[in-house]
Amino acid sequence: MEDYPRDLLELEVRFSTEAACREYLFQLRWPTGFCCPRCGGRKAWPVSGVLVQCAACNRQTSVTAGTIFQDSRVPLTLWFRAVWWVTSQKNGTSAMGLQRVLGLKSYKTAWALLHKLRRAMVRPDRDRLSGWVEVDETYLGGLEEGVHGRQTEAKALIVVAAQEDGPGIGRIRMRRIPDASAESLVPFVRDSVEAGSVIHTDGWLGYLPLANQGYDHEVTFLKGKKKTPSELMPRVHRVVSLLKRWLLGTHQGAVSLEHLDEYLDEFTFRFNRRKSRSRGKLFFRLLQQAVAVDPAPYKSLVKCSAIGEARSHKM
Ligand SMILES: [Zn+2]
């Protein structure tokens, strides 16, 4: 059941109260009925408008407890509007843009909302890439110019994996890494790409161990060729140039290195869903992940699987 608003008007009409938002989150978090985050119990009764009590262990909980909404003073109606705005804009929004559109008094609130939402953009059990995958690392520079006047290292090294989809790009993964050693590159590939896939890299030594890790390693050497790196790994370099444009455009370069990882997550979320026709569906996905990402004991993850079967096979 994928039930989501089709447009802004529908959103406004449907989610005008806290109770309506709660009810929607309840359906997303417990699609097959309540499941106690402590014991996995299935029976509960309401003890207030917000809390329910587990019949088995008496634990009182709410649909937002243990999710990104926990302890937030922002009403859910506002959260829902933030999620709508974030998912309906092709390139997302800056904190300042969100503050303006939601009429928030504080920039910090808008910033915190976006930040928490970014955490929900990584699905804990997401599939790894497979097939033919280009991998390359590159520097992102000039990110912190003018930020608080601090003198910080202005460059970050990132590694990007891009699935080859004919001449085009399928899904991507990216990560910030401390250096281009095998110790940094190989774990990224292992976390991002299924074993048995073909990994396409340049001749850098850091990728050599991949052949012993269950991958088919295809190397294209730069040396002696007239081609530039962007011609050798065209997909990765296309992704990186889009990423740079996004950081400089939507976020006007005001991304601190400290938070770069979260921005990479958001970019990946958007990129991998760029062909999705329905914005409402992205709204649904992001809220679904928002009630699933956070601290829940392993036992409850298994028993209360909210996002399909894959979850119970994790760890
Ligand atoms: Zn319980």
Image (tube, grey):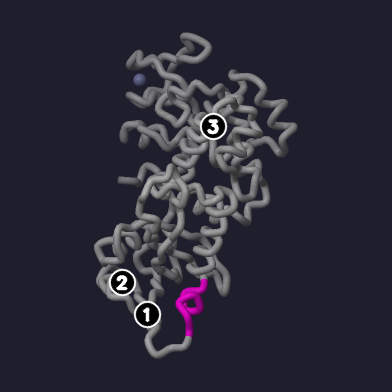
Please, which residue is most extreme toward the right here?
9
Q: Determine crowd level at label 1: few under 14, some 14-19, many 20+ residues with C-alpha closer than 10 A.
A: some
Q: Residue type at mark 2?
A: Tyr
Q: Is residue 309 visible?
A: no
Query: Quadrant holding ligand 1?
Result: top left
* Residue that label 2 marks: 207
- Residue at the (63%, 38%) spot, across then down: 85
- Residue at the (41%, 68%) spot, across then down: 135
- Among numbered discs 2 and 1, the one appearing first in the sequence: 2
Q: Residue type at mark 3?
A: Tyr
Which residue is more in the foreground, 78 or 163?
A: 78
Q: Determine crowd level at label 2: few under 14, some 14-19, many 20+ residues with C-alpha closer than 10 A.
A: many
For the N terminus, the image quarter is top right
59 on left or right of 244: left
The image shows residue 224 at horizontal and vertical percentages of 39, 90
Q: Are marks 2 and 1 in contact (CB under 8 Å)?
A: yes
Distance in Å between CA atoms under marks 3 and 1? 47 Å
- Residue at the (33%, 24%) spot, across then down: 38
The image shows residue 284 at horizontal and vertical percentages of 59, 39
- In this picture, which residue range is highlighted in magenta? 227-234
The dot on residue 219 is 1
- Among numbered discs 3 and 1, the one appearing first in the sequence: 3
Which residue is more in the foreground, 57 or 153?
A: 153
